[in-house]
Image (tube, helix red, strand yellow):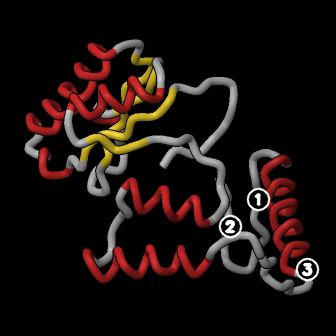
């Protein structure tokens, strides 16, 4: 707690507090003294494609989140590594895709309206067989129906289950 009165210097109960404040102020000033630099160019990315994706989404729906497919296209245009996946609109389609990918798979809600999918149980991991994929699809669908948000479901994203790395998932 700082005890300060106009015309006086602030006092602190511990010396570490003003030392931390001074450290942050010096770091900020050092950062501000850096010369203004050019934004780096990334010649291998397709910025015109990213602009088209965003412009199309804005013109069709206005502001808001991109669909799973739009996000995938945008990240691909930016040359970011992605875990491959496909959106399925039915349980049977999800099973077919999972069989093509190979088990185990991850099944995630595809929705531009619901952003925090894990919070509503809409991400299912390590699905080892067709029955697990079918059950995951139906469980996600049932949860949304119970919450009166079924219209937010565009399908589910079916992806291979990966381990030991860091990657983006669209």
The residue where tag 3 is placed is 34
Q: CA distance from mark 3 to mark 2?
A: 33 Å
Check the image and report above or below for 149 versus 44. above
Contact, mark 1 vs mark 2 (Cβ under 8 Å):
yes
Residue 39, image x, y percentages? 78, 81
Upstream in sequence: badge 1 or badge 3: 1
Q: Is residue 2 left or right of residue 114?
A: right
Between 30 and 16, the one nearer to me in the picture: 30
Mark 3 secondary-structure assignment: loop
Residue 166, image x, y percentages? 66, 37
- Give the residue drawn at x 33%, y 68%: 64
Asked which quadrant contains residue 32, the reply is bottom right
Check the image and report above or below for 35 versus 10. below
Mark 1 or 3: the one toward you: 3
Contact, mark 3 vs mark 2 (Cβ under 8 Å):
no
Between 11 and 69, the one nearer to me in the picture: 69
Upstream in sequence: badge 3 or badge 2: 2
Upstream in sequence: badge 1 or badge 2: 2
- Give the residue drawn at x 30%, y 26%: 95
Q: CA distance from mark 1 to mark 2?
A: 7 Å
Q: Is residue 41 left or right of residue 129?
A: right
Q: Is residue 63 left or right of residue 77?
A: left
Residue 23, image x, y percentages? 87, 60
Mark 2 secondary-structure assignment: loop
The residue where tag 2 is placed is 4
- Give the residue drawn at x 36%, y 63%: 65
Mark 1 secondary-structure assignment: loop
Asked which quadrant contains residue 70, the reply is bottom left
> Mark on residue 11?
1
């Amino acid at each position: 707690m700082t005890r300060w009165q106009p015309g006086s210097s602030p006092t602190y109960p511990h010396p570490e507090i003003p030392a931390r404040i001074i450290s942050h102020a010096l770091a900020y000033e050092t950062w501000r003294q850096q010369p203004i630099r050019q934004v780096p160019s990334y010649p291998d990315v397709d910025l015109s494609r990213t602009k088209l994706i965003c412009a199309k989404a804005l013109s069709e729906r206005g502001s808001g989140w991109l669909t799973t497919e739009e996000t995938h296209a945008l990240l691909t245009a930016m040359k970011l590594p992605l875990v491959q996946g496909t959106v399925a609109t039915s349980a049977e389609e999800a099973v077919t895709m999972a069989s093509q990918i190979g088990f185990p798979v991850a099944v995630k809600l595809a929705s531009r309206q619901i952003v925090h999918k894990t919070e509503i149980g809409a991400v299912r991991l390590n699905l080892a067989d067709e029955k697990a994929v079918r059950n995951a699809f139906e469980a996600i669908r049932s949860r949304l129906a119970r919450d009166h948000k079924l219209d937010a479901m565009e399908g589910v994203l079916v992806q291979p289950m990966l381990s030991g790395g860091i990657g983006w998932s669209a």
